[in-house]
Amino acid sequence: MAYAIKAEIKDPQAEIFVFATQKTMYGGKHVAEGDVVFLFASENEGGQGLVARGVVTSSEPIPRRADLDRQTPRVSVCVHRTALATRPLGRDELKRFKDWKDGRPETELNFKFYRQATNKIVGISDATVAFLDEFF
């Protein structure tokens, strides 16, 4: 499975990205070493959306806290960049894809990243991987 991460990315040109204690949703907690990841610089943090593709070099689940009854799984990952995006893809490009049941890759990304605007790691479908590959 492939994944996408929306997070604060201060240097989109970096070769190594470290994401500590990231929230996970939609299967994101299963991210593991060797998985392909698409990196989105969060617009909430001043980013512009899709910036890079990479491979997970390490992944470590964060233990749940005993003092909380309900909590979202979190994971820390390290990603080695393998390519930089050559075209823009972010909130502005995806916001018109709102028919949650249309099966489009654009809609999947809009739903998983922007319906709840928090930063997170999400699992993505093979169709969305093929769509995102066109941006490199």
Image: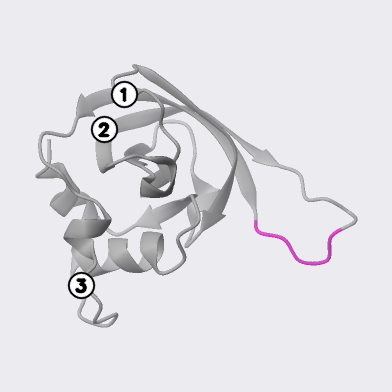
- Per the image, label 1 sits on a secondary structure element best described as strand
Q: Is residue 66 visible?
A: yes
| First-in-chain label (2 vs 1) | 2
Considering every residue shown, the one lying at the far right of the view is 67
Nearest-to-viewer mark from 3 and 1: 3
Would you say residue 69 sits in the magenta stretch?
Answer: yes
x 49%, y 44%: residue = 31
Q: Position of residue 113 (x, y in %)?
A: 38, 59
Placement of 77 over or under 111, stated as above or below: above
Is 125 left, or right, of 102 in this rendering? right
Is 109 left, or right, of 96 in this rendering? right
x 14%, y 53%: residue = 131
Q: Which residue is mark 2?
A: 52
Q: Amino acid at mark 1?
A: Arg
Q: Position of residue 78 (x, y in %)?
A: 49, 26
Placement of 127 over or under 74, stated as above or below: below
Mark 2 vs mark 1, CA separation in Å: 7 Å
Q: Is residue 127 visible?
A: no
Tell me if label 2 and label 1 are in contact, CB under 8 Å.
yes
Q: Which residue is mark 3?
A: 97
Q: Position of residue 50 (x, y in %)?
A: 25, 42
Placement of 61 over or under 115, stated as above or below: above
Question: Picture quarter containing residue 114?
Answer: bottom left
Main SS category, magenta section: loop
| First-in-chain label (3 vs 1) | 1
x 31%, y 26%: residue = 12
Q: Which residue is mark 1?
A: 81
Marker count (numbered): 3
x 27%, y 34%: residue = 53
**Dot 2 alpha-carbon crowd within 10 angstroms: few under 14, some 14 to 19, many 20 or more:** many
The magenta-colored residue range is 68-72
Q: Amino acid at mark 3?
A: Phe
